[in-house]
């Protein structure tokens, strides 16, 4: 099942994001066979990073939560909020 992760950064946490970016990208690389899409959410300026959006396949909600909890960004305390929801692709048809 696919899960959507909507992660919102804490205000003023750009240094936390920058200093943990390589570890986060390594973590995603280690799970690339499960990732449908992943990338930063951008601020109104179209350049600053203010969160993350991922769509990742897991067996169940517990596995999705474990993935979120073990993300280096989460461990570093970057996120103000993380929402995880089951997601279904409708368009374009696979």
Image: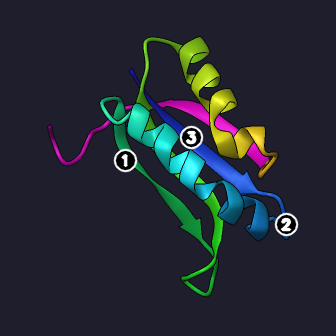
Asked whether the beta carbons under mark 3 and mark 2 sit within 8 Å of each other, the answer is no
> What sort of colour scheme is used for the picture?
rainbow
Residue 2: % across, % down: 40, 28
Q: Are marks 1 and 2 in contact (CB under 8 Å)?
A: no
Nearest the eye: 68 or 5:
68
Q: Earlier in the sequence, mark 1 or mark 3?
A: 3
Q: Which mark is residue 11?
A: 2
Residue 7 lies left or right of residue 78; in this view the side is left
* Residue farthest bottom in this picture: 45
Q: Is residue 55 above or below residue 20?
A: above
State whether residue 52 is above or below residue 32: below
Residue 31 counted in the magenta span: no
91 drawn magenta? yes
Q: Which mark is residue 7?
A: none
Check the picture and name the quadrant holding the N terminus: top left
Which residue does the image show at 65% across and 29% down from the upper left? 70
Give coordinates of residue 34: x percent, y percent.
35, 29
Q: Give the number of the disc on residue 37.
A: 1
User: Mark 3, mark 2: which one is toward the viewer?
Assistant: 2
**Helix, strand or loop at disc 1?**
strand
Disc 2 residue crowd, few under 14, some 14–19, many 20+, Cα 10 Å: few
CA separation in Å, label 1 and label 3: 10 Å
Q: Residue furthest left?
A: 94
Label placed on residue 5: 3
Q: Which residues are magenta?
A: 80-94
Q: Position of residue 31 (x, y in %)?
A: 41, 31
């Amino acid at each position: 099942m696919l899960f959507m992760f909507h992660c919102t950064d804490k205000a003023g946490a750009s240094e936390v994001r920058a200093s943990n970016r390589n570890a986060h990208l390594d973590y995603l690389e280690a799970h690339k066979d499960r990732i449908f899409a992943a990338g930063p959410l951008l601020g109104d300026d179209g350049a600053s990073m203010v969160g993350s959006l991922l769509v990742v396949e897991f067996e169940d909600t517990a596995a999705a939560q474990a993935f979120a909890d073990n993300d280096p960004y989460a461990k570093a305390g970057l996120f103000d909020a993380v929402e995880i929801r089951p997601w279904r692709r409708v368009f374009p048809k696979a």
